Image: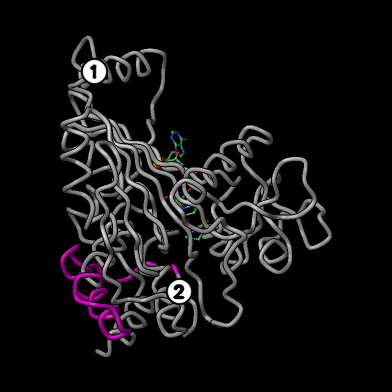
Amino acid sequence: MSALSDRAGSTLSFDALVSLLEKIFLRHGTSAEVARTLAENCAGAERDGAHSHGVFRIPGYVSTLNSGWVNGKAVPAVEDVASGFVAVDAANGFAQPALAAARPLLVAKARSAGIAVLAIRNSHHFAALWPDVEPFAYEGLVALSVVNSMTCVVPHGADRPLFGTNPIAFAAPRADGEPIVFDLATSAIAHGDVQIAARKGELLPPGMGVDSLGQPTCDPKAILEGGALLPFGGHKGSALSMMVELLAAALTGGNFSFEFDWSNHPGAKTPWTGQLLIVIDPSKAAGQNFAERSQELVRQMHAVGLRRLPGDRRHRERSKSNERGIVLEEQTLAQLRELAGQ
Ligand SMILES: NC(=O)C1=CN([C@@H]2O[C@H](COP(=O)(O)OP(=O)(O)OC[C@H]3O[C@@H](n4cnc5c(N)ncnc54)[C@H](OP(=O)(O)O)[C@@H]3O)[C@@H](O)[C@H]2O)C=CC1
Ligand SMILES: O=C(O)C1=NCCCC1
C-alpha cells in the first residue's frame, strides 16, 4: 500500500475511527480484544494530534501482522511476582494488551503498597507512550513508563547506532485541570517524524541525525537509508536512553534494541522489546495533598510566563476533535477503508 498522506478532508467521530481501525486489525489476524485495544490507542493518538503514532502507523501494523513477526492473537501471561512487582510475558504480542491484562493487579498493588512496578517482556510497542500513563493520573496515581525500540540512535560519543528512540512518559494528577503528562523520545526526533518529513520532502533542523558516513545531515532520507539519529541533548539524552534500555529490557527480560533480528520477516516494523511502568499512589506519601501541590507548581510556572505545558497542545487537539470530529485526508480514509475490506 502506498504511504498515507496528510491533506485534510473527511471528519470521523472517535467511535467511527475506532471501529474502522478495529476492522483492519481483525482482518489482518488479531484477536477481537487486541483489535479493540490497538484501535482505541491509535485513534486516541490521531484524535490528540499525535500524528507520528496515529493512523500513519496502520500500514506498518498491517505489514508487520502479514509478515508473521508478531502474534496478533497472543494471550499475555500475568505473573504476581512480589508485593510491589507484577510481570507479564506478552507472548510475542503487542504491549498494550499486556498492560491491560496486568492493570487491575498493578493498581491494587500500588494502592496497597504505595508503589508497584510492571515489567512487560516479549512485547511489541509501536505506539505513543502517553496513552499508557495518562489513565493512571485520571485515577489519582502517578505513573512513569519507558519502552525501548529498535537500533537507530548513535550513543553520544560513539560511531555507530545502538540505542532505540526509547521514549519516557510521565503522568501526574493535578487538582484543577488535566493531569500533567509528558511523553518524549530520547532521540533528537522520533523515527516516525523522520519518516513523515521524508514523505513530505521536507528537511529536518540541524542536529537530528547523521548519514551513512556518520556526517551530520538534515536530509531525512539520508538518515533512514543507512544513516542514524542522535540522542537529544548530547550526553544527557544518551544517558537517559541507556537507562531506558536497562529498565525496559534488562530489568524486564525483554530484548535490548539491538537484540532482535527481523530480517527474515520483510515488512516487520514493530520493535520486539520490553516496557517498564512504575505506578505510585501519592495518597500514601507524607505531607500535603499531591494534586494540590502539582497545581501549585503549575500556577507558579504560569506566573513566570510559561504559556504551554507538555500535554496542552494534545488536549487542545482532543477538544477540537471531540467538537468537530477527527479530520482525515480523503486518500487516507480511502486507504484505511480498503485495508478494512470496505
Ligand atoms: N513506541 C516507541 O517505541 C516510540 C514511541 N515514540 C513516541 O513518539 C512520540 C513523539 O515523541 P517526541 O517527538 O519526542 O515528542 P515531542 O518532542 O513532540 O514532544 C515531547 C513532549 O514535550 C511536549 N512539548 C513539545 N513542545 C513543547 C513546548 N514548546 N512547550 C512545552 N511542551 C512541549 C509535548 O507535549 P504535547 O504532546 O502537548 O505537544 C510532549 O509531551 C511520543 O508519543 C513517543 O511516545 C517515540 C519513540 C519510540
Ligand atoms: O517514532 C519512533 O521512534 C518509533 N515509534 C514506534 C516504534 C518504533 C520507533
Task: Specify the farthest residue to the front.
Answer: 82
Residue corresponding to mark 2 = 60
Secondary element under disc 1, as helix, strand or loop, is loop
Q: Residue at x 19, y 70 (%)?
A: 33
The crowding category of the residue bearing disc 1, from other C-alpha atoms within 10 Å (few below 14, some 14 to 19, many at least 20), is few
> Which amino acid type is marked by label 2?
Gly
Asked if the residue at label 1 sits under 8 Å from ligand 1, the reply is: no
In the picture, which quadrant includes the C terminus?
Answer: bottom left
x, y percentage for residue 109?
A: 20, 37
Q: Residue at x 18, y 54 (%)?
A: 322
Q: Quadrant of residue 284?
A: top left
Task: Specify the farthest residue to the top.
Answer: 287
Q: Quadrant of residue 161?
A: bottom right
Please state which of residues 213 and 245 is positioned toward the viewer in this rendering.
245
Please state which of residues 88 and 21 is positioned toward the viewer in this rendering.
88
Asked if the residue at label 2 sits under 8 Å from ligand 2, the reply is: no
Residue corresponding to mark 1 = 285
Where 280 sits versus 135, above or below? above
Q: Residue at x 46, y 78 (%)?
A: 69
Whichever of labels 1 and 2 marks the residue nearer the N terminus, that label is 2
Left or right position of 9 against 288:
right
Query: Magenta part of the protein: which range?
Result: 6-34
Residue 171 tag number: none
> Which amino acid type is marked by label 1?
Ala
Where 256 sits versus 266, above or below? above
Please state which of residues 238 and 175 is positioned toward the viewer in this rendering.
238
Where 221 sits versus 156, above or below? below
Q: Quadrant of ligand 1?
A: top left
x, y percentage for residue 269?
A: 50, 71
Q: Residue at x 43, y 77 (%)?
A: 59
Where 278 sits versus 119, above or below? above
